[in-house]
Image (cartoon, helix red, strand yellow):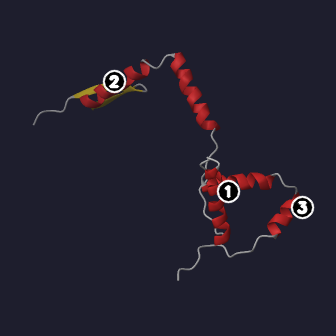
């Protein structure tokens, strides 16, 4: 049986025996890290990172609403399509939240008190 090819590498002052393949891979890795990107491209990477960090995290959720109100979303979408605006359900709901946020406490209380109270959760299957 042929002996395995090994190479010696010092790690924190201690000699460590590793396989020749690992030694070659480590050399390639060290060469790549030595040839790091020049400062301008490094700055571009940093700029990309900051743009990503500025994006607000999106949250997925589910909720229950009466069918009549759900249909109103479709009606609002139809009005938007006639005005040559393509909108999604989530955009309609977000616009509604923006409009509610502009109300004062009394107006908001009145709007919320006019809503029908419904049980939360999934409706039963028949």
Which is in the foreground here, disc 1 or disc 2? 1
User: x, y percentage for residue 123?
Assistant: 59, 76
**Residue 19 visible from this viewpoint:** no
Label disc, if present, on residue 106 of the rendered structure: 3
Q: Position of residue 67 (x, y in %)?
A: 63, 71
Q: Are marks 3 and 2 in contact (CB under 8 Å)?
A: no
Mark 2 surroundings within 10 Å by alpha-carbon count, few (fewer than 14), some (14 through 19), many (20 or more): few
Residue wearing tag 1: 93
When asked about the image quadrant of residue 5, the answer is top left
- Earlier residue among tags 3 and 1: 1
* Residue visible at 62% across and 40% down in the picture: 55
Front position in the image: 62 or 54: 62
Measured along the vertical axis of the image, is residue 78 above or below residue 64?
A: above
Residue drawn where x is 73% and y is 55% of the image = 97
Instruction: Name the residue nearer the viewer: 67 or 6.
Output: 67
Which element type, helix, strand or loop, lies under badge 3?
A: helix
Give the number of the disc on residue 28.
2
Q: Are marks 1 and 2 in contact (CB under 8 Å)?
A: no
x and y percentages locating residue 44 in the rendered image: 55, 23
Identify the element where label 1 is drawn: helix
Q: Is residue 55 left or right of residue 24?
A: right
In the rendered image, the quadrant that contains the N terminus is: top left
Q: Is residue 86 visible?
A: yes
Q: Quadrant of residue 32?
A: top left
Marks 3 and 1 sit apart, C-alpha to C-alpha, by 21 Å
The answer to which of 94 and 49 lies nearer the viewer is: 94
Q: How many angstroms separate mark 3 from mark 2 (CA)? A: 68 Å
Q: What percent of the width, then of the height, locates residue 12?
A: 43, 27
Height in image: 109 above or below 7? below
Q: N-terminal of the two: label 3 or label 2?
A: 2
């Amino acid at each position: 049986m042929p002996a395995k090819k090994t190479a010696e590498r010092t790690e924190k002052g201690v000699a460590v025996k590793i396989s020749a393949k690992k030694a070659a891979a480590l050399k390639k890795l060290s060469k790549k890290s030595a040839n790091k990107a020049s400062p301008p491209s490094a700055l571009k990477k940093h700029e990309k990172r900051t743009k990503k960090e500025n994006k607000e995290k999106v949250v997925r959720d589910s909720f229950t609403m009466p069918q009549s109100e759900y249909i109103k979303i479709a009606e609002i979408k139809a009005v938007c399509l006639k005005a040559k605006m393509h909108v999604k359900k989530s955009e309609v709901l977000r616009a509604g939240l923006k409009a509610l946020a502009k109300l004062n406490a009394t107006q908001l209380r009145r709007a919320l008190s006019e809503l029908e109270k419904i049980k939360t959760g999934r409706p039963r299957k028949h």
